[in-house]
Image: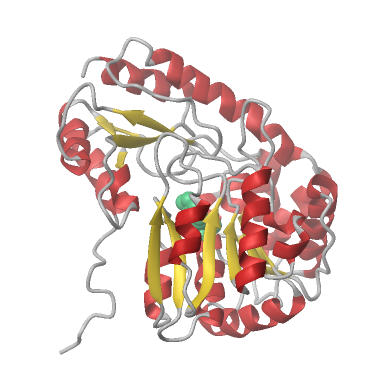
Amino acid sequence: MLQSKLPDVGTTIFTRMSALAQEHGALNLSQGFPDFPPPHALRAALARHALEGHNQYAPMAGLPALREAIASQLRRHRGVHCDPETEITVVPGATEAIYCAITACVRPGEEVILLDPCYDSYRPAVILAGGVPVHVPMNAPAFAPDWERIEQAISARTRLLVINSPHNPTGAVMSREDLLQLEELVTRHGLLVVSDEVYEYLVYDGRRHHSALQFAGLRERCFAVFSFGKTFGVTGWKTGYCVAPPALTAELRKVHQFVCFVAVTPVQQALADFMTAEPDYALTLAAGYQRKRDLFCAALADSRFTLQPSAGSYFQLLDYSAISASDDTVLCEQWTREAGVASIPVSVFYQQRPPQRLLRFCFAKQDEQLLRAAERLCRI
Ligand SMILES: Cc1ncc(COP(=O)(O)O)c(C=O)c1O
């Protein structure tokens, strides 16, 4: 009756692993969200705005007060200047912005370069636009872009390149040199960029996040995408924003207004209040998450897994090659059932099965959960 436009897509691994964790009462370190509450002031502001009657459609591009707060944060934290009127769009989640940016730019037959492993929404968005995803792998242990391979993958049909730093699932953080290489490459080839920066504040051990917006050549050809869900620990609020130059923003909004039209009004009010009252709250996050990463990694010291502490994001990879040669998806399911800890197999983020044997664990969890999970993992 209907020939699927996405024949390879089933229920995502995140939904499957969370369901399996629940079924077997396993500790769930699979899905990427915190199990501790977001700031009280933020939640109180949401309740207040809903009760005070801010429950109807916001302006399509986002509440002016929130766009002002975003512009001010970008100035304060990144030294980036942008016009909230023409360059910032508030969206119902970073995923929607990525979809809208790809849909706005990619025509049938045009190619989009994706760096594997990559977040699972990029490829379906390209395919639905009639585009052709071209996957270029990044290799363990550094998971840095291989610029030579990327250049080789560029053709006359290449339209767009998607980057993600800090990176899900590997935690890799792109260096300034990487961004300079990207800037040189996309300028020379006339490509557009989607820069997924949803974990921008979660970088560790004194590293810095380099936003694509801080590089003049990228700034003029880039959709930079951010998520309040990740920054403020409110993934269920599904609100984020996209920063792009006026001409790109105009095209993004044409799609956004017919996909979702707006983001949720009282959520935007609450975020605007919170960011205005606590403009540097986001800068305090990394220390707390780094402590959690260290707690989890230290508790795994006696396990048979090997690891390199994550550089960014709230994910930690564990290498199980000393334990088993089995398929990572099979092991993930087995260890959820038998060891009582759910994780995500890293191969699902690749188009071509990778040689390494890695599982992804989310450490945005209460200390007690992390310690219990590590204890169980030490028994494997
Ligand atoms: C790399 C990456 N991009 C985008 C998103 C989606 O963000 P949002 O929930 O704001 O749509 C996620 C969520 O896990 C992610 O890991």
**Residue ID at (64%, 32%):** 286
Q: Is residue 375 visible?
A: yes
Q: Is residue 138 above or below residue 203?
A: below
In this view, the residue in front, 368 or 291, is 291
Colouring used for the render: secondary structure
- Quadrant in the picture for the C terminus: top left
**Looking at the picture, how far across and down is residue 195, in whole percent?**
59, 59
How many marks overall? 0
In the figure, is residue 215 to the left or right of 307? right
Point 50% across, 62% down: residue:
151
Vertical placement of residue 275 versus 203, above or below? below
Q: Position of residue 60 (x, y in %)?
A: 67, 79
Q: Quadrant of residue 302?
A: top left
Q: Quadrant of the N terminus?
A: bottom left
Image location of residue 270, percent across then percent down: 71, 55
- Say which of 109 and 6 sits in front: 109
Q: Nearer the viewer, residue 125 or 134?
A: 134
Query: Residue 24 sits in which quadrant?
Result: top left
Q: Is residue 24 left or right of residue 82?
A: left
Query: Residue sitting at 76 percent across and 71 percent down?
Result: 87
Please say if 330 is above or below 92. above
Q: Can the viewer see residue 50 in this picture?
A: no
* 306 with respect to 182 (left or right): left
x and y, in percent, of residue 254 in the image:
61, 85
Which residue, as the protein is rendered here, is positioned at the far bottom? 1
Q: Quadrant of residue 52?
A: bottom right
In the image shown, does 9 or 176 lie closer to the viewer? 176
